[in-house]
Image: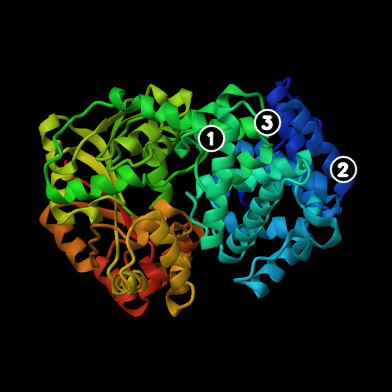
Amino acid sequence: MNRKERRAARKHGTPGTPRPARSAGDETAKLFVDATESERAQKFDDAVRLYKRVLLANPGHAEACNNLGRVLQTQGKTKEASLHYARALALMPQLLAQYAGICTTLFALLPELSEALRRQTAAWPKHLSQAELFGDSGLASIGADPLLLHLLQSTPVRDVPFERLLTSLRSSFLADAIAAKETASETVLRFACAVAKQCFINEYVFATAPEEDAQVADLQDKLGGALATSAPVDPMWVAASAMYSSLHTLRSGPALLDRSWMPAIEDLLTQQLREPAQERALREAIPRLTAINDETSKQVQQQYEENPYPRWVHPAGQVAPVSIDQILREQFPTSAFASLGKTDNLEMLIAGCGTGQVAISSVQKYHGARALAVDLSLTSLCYAKRKTPADVASRIDYAQADILNLASIDRSFDVVDACGVLHHMANPLDGWRILLGLVRAGGLMHLAFYSEAGRSDVVAARAFIAEHAFGATADEIRRARQALLKTPLASVTRFTDFFTTSECRDLLFHVQESRLALPAIKTFVAQNKLRFLGFEFETPVAAQYRQSFAEQGWSMTDLDRWHAIETKFPDTFSGMYQFWVQTPN
């Protein structure tokens, strides 16, 4: 939703220089450059005209969609701007990672939504009615906004005020469904279905009250009775039920597929009935590469069978693959590493692939990549297989395996990726050592470990949870979240994992969490003669560190220096240590 995606303008010949005939792509690129130049010059009418010409020639031009939305917003044409912003996100779902920026844009486009957030925040824990939230215009003031609808159906809401607003709206929809005074408008039903899809995406993490739970049970009984007797079913019954539990968990759920519904309800049925059925059907097709006999591995497996992590929605779009050598040179310009020299047949192992995001993004990003993606959890692997785009499916093999037994598969790889898995083993360094045995000479490892210093608030929150005897069920996770929000430990909301059930369980209730400090990593690197290439940071942060290190005459690969920095600034690696190493030739 900003200028980060702007590409450099292409240079053109001097006046009078003969030019070769342009292709349609060249003409579109020239139009895009002209449009961006008009926007910079604040010639907004010209910019709008030119961006629309770009989209006429190439409707899938995500950056033109985004930029057109920005110009239209500047002109005060908020409804049209919202439409183009939503289209940009649909074309490039990876932009959803800029959640805070998207919400800033959304609230600017919809001041009614911003005001409703303010009102509900001030009133919490009371749930405000739609009239109290939106005034006389009611839900109609926001219900049809394309950007809001897309956001709700594409990513978990990841801030507390927005979560509380949706929690309140959900209870109002439940009350409307029970009252059933009149059929809801199509706009209201579409918005209700979007809220239901959001609740499925976040795995019903929103708080509930006992009276709500009783009302939901009554509504679902009513829905089941109507389906069993072929009686009419109000679509709002379906949407409201789906806001509190997935339709595939209802005994009467499959009967919903025997009826005809409006498109929004059909989409909801696909999300909550058809797709879960597809995942169940895939279980027998997943190969089992190794035994799972370690007790810690079995406990971790059970957690992820119950709560696959994470339940993402859309894979990245419009990714142009680049060689891994080029990516690492750009990421670590001051580090020396031996080039792999591979632009095809780059063999990767994704160890602990979970629900497939890393495996999919890797084969999309690295030129010529093929991946074996393994995990303990069949449920996670089925989710990954169903979500894998058709254009990369032939390059990813999913299989169930335990890292502790992977040496038995008798294979080696150019790259091993183990981000976010080793710290869930009884001894993370044992797991690292096993994976190291699968890397070819001169190969690469991409690793991530929890930092002891960076997770002090998580450790404190886990202690709070244990002290208050909260369990790891969905209901207990909901209760624990609300209790934490009333304490200084609400700082854990800085982790996006706080905002879905499976991710919150992974963050605060995990059956096995280990943490490391940099001296231990340094020792392991030295003992195994690995070359430390560098830590991963967001681009602006990485540039700041490079400048600071250069000014001090330090090396970016000096782990002693990094340890001194983390000791002084414990939040330096508050997410994880994420880094690359290379094995000796």
Residue found at x 47% / y 61%: 543
Give the SS element for disc 2: helix
How far across and down, in percent of the image, does residue 246 sit? 50, 41
Where does label 3 land, which residue? 232
Give yes or no for contact between labels 2 and 1 (Cβ–Cβ under 8 Å): no
Rendered image: mark on residue 309: none
Cα separation between marks 2 and 1 = 41 Å
Give the SS element for disc 1: helix
Q: Amino acid at mark 3?
A: Pro
Q: Earlier in the sequence, mark 1 or mark 3?
A: 3
User: Which quadrant would the C terminus be assigned to in this image?
Assistant: top left
How far across and down, in percent of the image, does residue 515 sit? 24, 64
10 Å crowding of disc 1: few (<14), some (14-19), many (20+): some
Residue found at x 46% / y 33%: 321
Quarter of the view holding residue 458: bottom left
Q: Amino acid at mark 2?
A: Asp
